[in-house]
Image: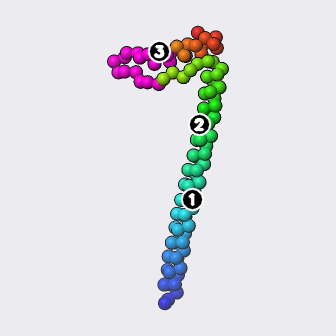
Amino acid sequence: MTVEQKVDVALESMIYTFLGIFTLAVVIGVAIGGLCLLCCMRCYQRGQKNRLDKARQEFGVNAPKMTTISLDGESKQDTQDLENGAKKVQASQGIE
């Protein structure tokens, strides 16, 4: 085996080792990033629920049922509830 062949084998071995370690690092990074994102979103949702409960208590407004508005432009009762709830909040804050 010549020196060039030994260098080629060593170089090939280093390249495959580097690619293996790099791939492993990327997989571990994706797993850690996904876990952090999951934890942050759970914390955000918990905080959002607490803020919503506080707003409901402070303004005495129940959350209206959420529905869509039909394409023909008719306003449904749930939309009226939403508008009435918004008016109550504005009135309690002195906004007209």
Q: Is residue 48 visible?
A: yes
Q: Which image quarter is the C terminus in?
A: top right
Q: Amino acid at mark 3?
A: Gln
**Mark 2 neighbour class, 10 Å CA radius: few under 14, some 14 to 19, many 20 or more:** few
Q: Earlier in the sequence, mark 1 or mark 3?
A: 1
For the residue labelled by badge 1, is the local secondary structure a helix, a strand or a loop? helix
**Residue at 49%, 16% in the rendered image:** 81
The answer to whether 42 is drawn above or below residue 26 in the figure is above
**What is the residue that sits farthest to the left in this orientation?**
72
Q: Is disc 2 placed on a helix, strand or loop?
A: helix
Span highlighted in magenta in the image = 66-83
Quadrant of residue 43 within the rendered picture: top right
Question: Which residue type does callout 1 highlight?
Answer: Ile
Q: Which mark is residue 60?
A: none
Residue 35 versus residue 71 in the image, above or below: below
Q: Which residue is mark 2?
A: 45
Name the spot of residue 1 as percent of width and height, x first.
Answer: 49, 90
Q: Which residue is denoted by mark 3 in the rendering?
A: 80
Label 1, residues with CA under 10 Å away: few <14, some 14-19, many ≥20 = few
Closer mark to the observer between disc 1 and disc 3: 3
- The answer to whether residue 95 is seen in the rendering is no
Q: Earlier in the sequence, mark 2 or mark 1?
A: 1
Query: Horizontal and vertical percent for residue 42?
Result: 59, 41
72 with respect to 50 (left or right) = left
- Which residue is denoted by mark 1 in the rendering? 28
Q: CA distance from mark 3 to mark 2?
A: 27 Å
Q: SS at mark 3?
A: helix
Task: Say which of 28 and 87 sits in front.
Answer: 87
Q: CA distance from mark 1 to mark 3?
A: 51 Å
Q: Is residue 84 left or right of residue 77?
A: right
Looking at the picture, how far across and down is residue 58, in whole percent? Answer: 66, 20
